[in-house]
Image (cartoon, helix red, strand yellow):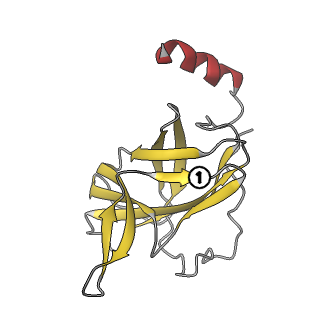
Amino acid sequence: MKRILLPAACAATFALPALACDGLQIEDPYARASTAMSQSGAAFLRFVNHGDAECHLISAQSDAAQRVELHTHIEDDAGVMRMVEVTEGFVIPAHGEYALERGGDHLMFLGLNQVFNHGDEISVTLSFVEGDDMEIVIPVDLERTPDHQPAHGHDHSHGHSHD
């Protein structure tokens, strides 16, 4: 039944990105790897939910890596920060925001199938409990400073609409 309903939904939103949750937008996405030889990378972005219902991100996939996991940083008993998978996913509240950012929650690319070169674009499919997938394109930005400002001075918080 999902196959039958999905094409109709896509046809109705041809000029807009496919939305897993009505009113969900992606702002300021970027990806990075620490070195050209890295076997892992990460992506960061901000979800803005203009809808009346929460959205629950449960997984991500990309041809850029063998696996994409939802990750966060936690402090262990010895005070060491470690990255761990968040199997329960991330909830984006209705009329709210949820940030995936350095030092916090993020998308983790494991077993890279390609080098993350500055200026490249990574296609990612986000899957939600609500049953829909959202296809997004994340630019690789190796010059991004830790305070999350674009290194080249441009504002990338333009959402993800297509004309």
- When the figure is inspected, residue 109 is found, relative to residue 146, above or below; the finding is above
Foreground pick, 130 / 138: 130
Image spot of residue 107 (x, y percent):
42, 58
Tell me if I can see residue 158 in this picture. Answer: yes
In the displayed image of the protein, which residue is found farthest to the bottom? 79
The image quadrant of residue 154 is: bottom right
Find disc 1 in the rendering and name its residue.
92
Q: Residue at x 61, y 34 (%)?
A: 18
Amino acid type indicated by mark 1? Ile
Q: Residue at x 45, y 76 (%)?
A: 103
- When the figure is inspected, residue 132 is found, relative to residue 68, above or below; the finding is above
Tell me if I can see residue 33 in this picture. Answer: no
In the displayed image of the protein, which residue is found farthest to the front? 77
Image spot of residue 135 (x, y percent):
52, 40
- When the figure is inspected, residue 144 is found, relative to residue 61, above or below; the finding is below
Callout 1: helix, strand or loop?
Answer: strand
Q: Is residue 123 left or right of residue 14?
A: left
Q: Residue at x 51, y 69 (%)?
A: 101
Q: Residue at x 34, y 57 (%)?
A: 109
Q: Is residue 157 left or right of residue 144?
A: right
Foreground pick, 72 / 136: 72
Image spot of residue 52 (x, y percent):
72, 42
Q: Is residue 58 left or right of residue 151?
A: left
Quadrant of the frame with the C terminus: top right
How many numbered circles does the render carry?
A: 1
Foreground pick, 139 / 11: 11
Q: Is residue 113 left or right of residue 72?
A: left
* Label 1 environment density (alpha carbons within 10 Å; few <14, some 14–19, many ≥20): many
The image quadrant of residue 37 is: bottom left
